[in-house]
Image (cartoon, grey):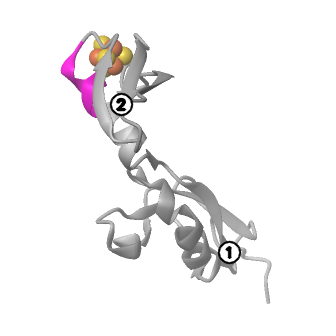
Amino acid sequence: MNEKVVEMTCVVCPIGCDLKVTLDENGKFLSVTGNKCPKGAIYAKEEVTDPKRILPTSVKVIGGELPLVSVRTEKPIPKRLIFDAMKVIKSIHVNAPVKRGQVIIRNILNTKVNVIATRTVKENRKSP
Ligand code: SF4
């Protein structure tokens, strides 16, 4: 059997354990070593089977002091959905004012994860 070992760093806590993940010849998760706690094993398995990431980006603002507001997903979403999520986020706009923490898109792509604003954009009072 041709097993493959993948090395990665656990990012779940600041300790940053060096993990060695063993996969079978089909890339299926077999085992993990180097984790000081069970969270590291869960992280390693997810990272090789369905990795997830926080998606930071921006959304157009209409009538704001700034033309864009920075946003991010509240929680990590599957990496395989990042491209489609970007398409959804780039296709919308919000009206000023926008408050930091405001939900911009609820349950993006049925992930049960919201996209939220990470800064405040006030209304542009100079606009006609
Ligand atoms: S394996 Fe556990 S102790 Fe090590 S970095 Fe991950 S969460 Fe922290």
Asked whether 126 or 98 is in front, the reply is 98
Secondary structure of the residue carrying tag 1 is strand
Q: How far across and how far down the image is residue 101, in percent?
A: 43, 56
**Residue at 63% from the left image edge and 58% from the top image edge:** 57
Q: Which residue is mark 1?
A: 60
**Residue at 41% from the left image edge and 49% from the top image edge:** 76
**Residue at 34% from the left image edge and 62% from the top image edge:** 113
Quick check: can you spot residue 99?
Answer: no
- For residue 77, side relative to residue 83 (left or right): left
Q: In which quarter of the view is residue 27 placed?
A: top left
39 is higher (above) or lower (below) than 78: above
Q: Which residue is mark 2?
A: 44
- Dot 2 or dot 1, earlier in sequence: 2
Residue numbers of the magenta segment: 37-42
Q: How far across and how far down the image is residue 8, in percent?
A: 49, 23
The amino acid beneath tag 1 is Lys
103 is higher (above) or lower (below) than 23: below
Residue farthest along the left direction in this orientation? 38
**Residue at 40% from the left image edge and 74% from the top image edge:** 109
Q: How far across and how far down the image is residue 46, in percent?
A: 34, 41
Answer few, some or many: residues within 10 Å of disc 2's Cα (few below 14, many 20 plus, some between 14 and 19). many
Secondary structure of the residue carrying tag 2 is helix
Q: Is residue 52 magenta?
A: no
7 is higher (above) or lower (below) than 115: above
Quick check: can you spot residue 19?
Answer: yes
- For residue 3, side relative to residue 84 (left or right): left
Q: Is residue 40 magenta?
A: yes
Q: Is mark 1 within 8 Å of ligand 1?
A: no
Residue farthest along the front direction in this orientation? 1
Q: Is mark 2 within 8 Å of ligand 1?
A: no
Can you tell which of label 2 and label 1 is closer to the viewer?
2
Q: CA distance from mark 2 to mark 1?
A: 36 Å
